[in-house]
Amino acid sequence: MPFLFSTGALAVDDKYPGRSEYPDVLIYEKSELFNNFSDVVLVDTRSKYEYETLRIKGAVNIPVASKDFDEKVTQLRASTTKPIVFYCNGKTCYKCYRAGRKANSLNIEDTYAYDAGVYEWAKTYPNHVVLLGMRPIVTGEITPAEKKVHISFAGP
């Protein structure tokens, strides 16, 4: 069973500021996501452009800002009983939290936010990401803090 927790009982978390703003959204931690990778459905909540640039391997793209987000997430839940894990860019990107809250408002159960984000995932698990349609990547050149991505391919 993955280590999951509701952020409602936690103090303000400087590392993940969105947790205090979205206490109703359950969190999936990075190591637990990795350990349960094949037992969840990953949803990239970012734009199609962001998704096509860098994504977690196997994720589907349902942008939280899209007009049909509610419909697509409802359809996704109807197609699987696996936990749905939303993710975005990371610690200060709140798209995964907003997606979790929307899913909660639709009474879609077993949904979580992976709020460490795609950049943290890529640094830790470079063989589990897709960059511009290719993998593996050289992680030392990903710099999300600068809002730039400098990328090298490990090979063809």
Image: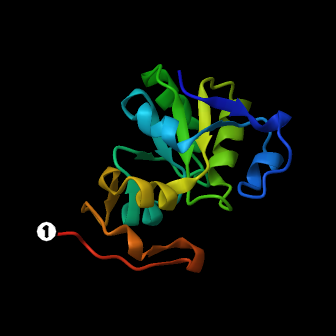
**Horizontal relation, residue 26 to residue 41: left or right:** right
Colour mapping used in the image? rainbow
User: Which residue shows up at 53% across the image and 37% down it?
Assistant: 85
**How far across and how far down the image is residue 113, in percent?**
61, 41
**How far across and how far down the image is residue 76, in percent?**
47, 31
148 or 141, nearer to the observer? 141
29 or 133, nearer to the observer? 29
User: Which residue shows up at 34% across the image and 48% down it?
Assistant: 57
User: Which residue shows up at 82% across the image and 49% down it?
Assistant: 21
Quadrant including the C terminus: bottom left
- Furthest toward the left, the residue is 156
63 or 1, nearer to the observer? 1
**Horizontal relation, residue 24 to residue 73: left or right:** right
41 or 75, nearer to the observer? 41
User: Looking at the picture, does residue 30 appear above or below residue 4?
Assistant: below
Figure label count: 1
**Horizontal relation, residue 34 to residue 90: left or right:** left
The amino acid sitting under disc 1 is Pro
User: Which residue shows up at 40% across the image and 73% down it?
Assistant: 140
**Horizontal relation, residue 86 to residue 41: left or right:** right
At label 1, counting other C-alpha atoms closer than 10 Å, the crowd grade (few under 14, some 14-19, many 20 or more) is: few
Q: Is mark 1 on a helix, strand or loop?
A: loop
Question: Which residue is denoted by mark 1 in the rendering?
Answer: 156
User: Looking at the picture, does residue 113 appear above or below residue 78?
Assistant: below
Question: In the picture, residue 93 is in which quadrant?
Answer: bottom right
**How far across and how far down the image is residue 19, in percent?**
76, 47
User: Looking at the picture, does residue 50 appear above or below residue 100?
Assistant: below
**How far across and how far down the image is residue 27, in percent?**
65, 38
